[in-house]
Each structure stands twice: as C-alpha cells, then as structure tokens.
Image (cartoon, rainbow, N blue to C red):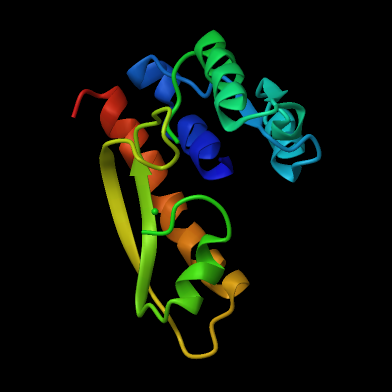
C-alpha cells in the first residue's frame, strides 16, 4: 500500500494521469498501514471483518466502501497464511500476483505476476519480505499502466 501511495506521489499520477490514491481501507482497525496512510495525507477507513456473520456480508460492505472512494485493485495459495502454506508444500518458487478485485477472493483477472525463489532457511517472514519487494515493484507499475490505458 505504501509503495503504491508513494509511487502515485513520486510519479505525479494526479497531474499526469488524472488519478490518485483515494482511500486506504483495512479489515483490521489497528493496522499500522492506516497510520502510515494518514501520515501521507490519505483518507483511511476500516471495515472490520469480525463484525460480520459471513464473508459475503463483509465483502458487500467492503465493496460499498470501495465504490464510495472509487475502484481499487487488490497468489497458487489464496487467502491467509500464504507463505507458510507454500513452505509446507515444498514449493521452490512462489510469487505475487496483481489481479482485478472480484467478489471471489484472489480470483480476478491477472494483471501482472512476479516470481520469488525459496532460499535455504526461509521462514514465512523472510519469504514474505522478499515477496513484498516484488509487490512494491509490480503494483505501482500495473496501476500506472491501467491509468494510462496500456
């Protein structure tokens, strides 16, 4: 999220592409990214998933909040604990995917992907850090390409 927001400022998306980061929404009220987003002057919001009886109800409210702010963009192991599950499966390579958001978790059209090899001694945390480096590279590039019509 911070990589996207910083790229929007650095690459002057508002001036050159007529776009901006409209809002940062988290499903966790205490997410550190909310404070960081506020420090960048961004509007923030919370849709706490624990407040809903079903995934569908949560998704509906989240979609409403996204629509109120304008559209947003959101891996083989969808959902939670991705890096631990990839390690447990003995994968040699993992990665990250940028895809369009749909009502089905992690199933939208693929817009970009990057691979990250496992290294000896990897933990979920070390793997997540290297994946995040790739996310910070491809998310802003995809958003910029979409905004420019590529």
Judge by depth and name the residue closer to the eye, 90 or 93: 90
Judge by depth and name the residue closer to the eye, 53 or 10: 53
Residue with the most extreme left position: 150
Q: Quadrant of the N terminus?
A: top right
Query: How many numbered discs?
Result: 0
Q: Quadrant of the C terminus?
A: top left
Question: Which residue is painted at 45% across and 85% down in the image?
Answer: 119
Location of residue 96 with respect to 35 vertically, above or below: below
Location of residue 66 with respect to 120 vertically, above or below: above
Judge by depth and name the residue closer to the eye, 84 or 120: 84
Q: In this view, does 89 lie to the left or right of 108?
A: right
Question: Which residue is painted at 27% across and 33% down in the image?
Answer: 145
Q: In this view, does 51 lie to the left or right of 123?
A: right
Q: Where's residue 107, x and y in %?
A: 35, 40
* Res. 142 image quadrant: top left
Residue with the most extreme right position: 30
Residue with the most extreme bottom position: 120
Location of residue 137 with respect to 59 vertically, above or below: below
Residue with the most extreme top position: 68
Q: Where's residue 122, x and y in %?
A: 54, 82
Q: In this view, does 9 lie to the left or right of 41?
A: left
Location of residue 118 with respect to 76 vertically, above or below: below
Judge by depth and name the residue closer to the eye, 27 or 18: 27
Question: Which residue is painted at 52% across and 24% down in the image?
Answer: 21
Question: Which residue is painted at 62% across and 28% down in the image?
Answer: 24
Q: Where's residue 86, x and y in %?
A: 46, 71
Q: Where's residue 113, x and y in %?
A: 30, 53
């Amino acid at each position: 999220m911070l990589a996207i927001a910083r790229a929007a400022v650095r690459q002057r998306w508002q001036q050159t592409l007529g776009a901006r980061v409209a809002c940062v929404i988290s499903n966790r009220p205490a997410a550190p990214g909310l404070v960081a987003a506020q420090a960048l002057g961004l509007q923030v919001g919370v849709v706490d998933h624990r407040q809903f009886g079903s995934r569908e109800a949560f998704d509906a409210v989240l979609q409403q909040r996204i629509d109120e702010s304008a559209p947003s963009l959101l891996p083989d192991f969808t959902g939670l604990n991705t890096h631990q599950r990839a390690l447990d499966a003995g994968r040699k390579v993992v990665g990250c995917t940028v895809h369009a958001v749909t009502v089905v978790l992690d199933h939208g059209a693929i817009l970009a992907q990057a691979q990250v090899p496992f290294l000896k001694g990897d933990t979920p945390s070390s793997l997540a850090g290297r994946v995040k480096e790739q996310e910070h590279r491809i998310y802003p590039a995809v958003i910029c390409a979409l905004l420019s019509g590529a």
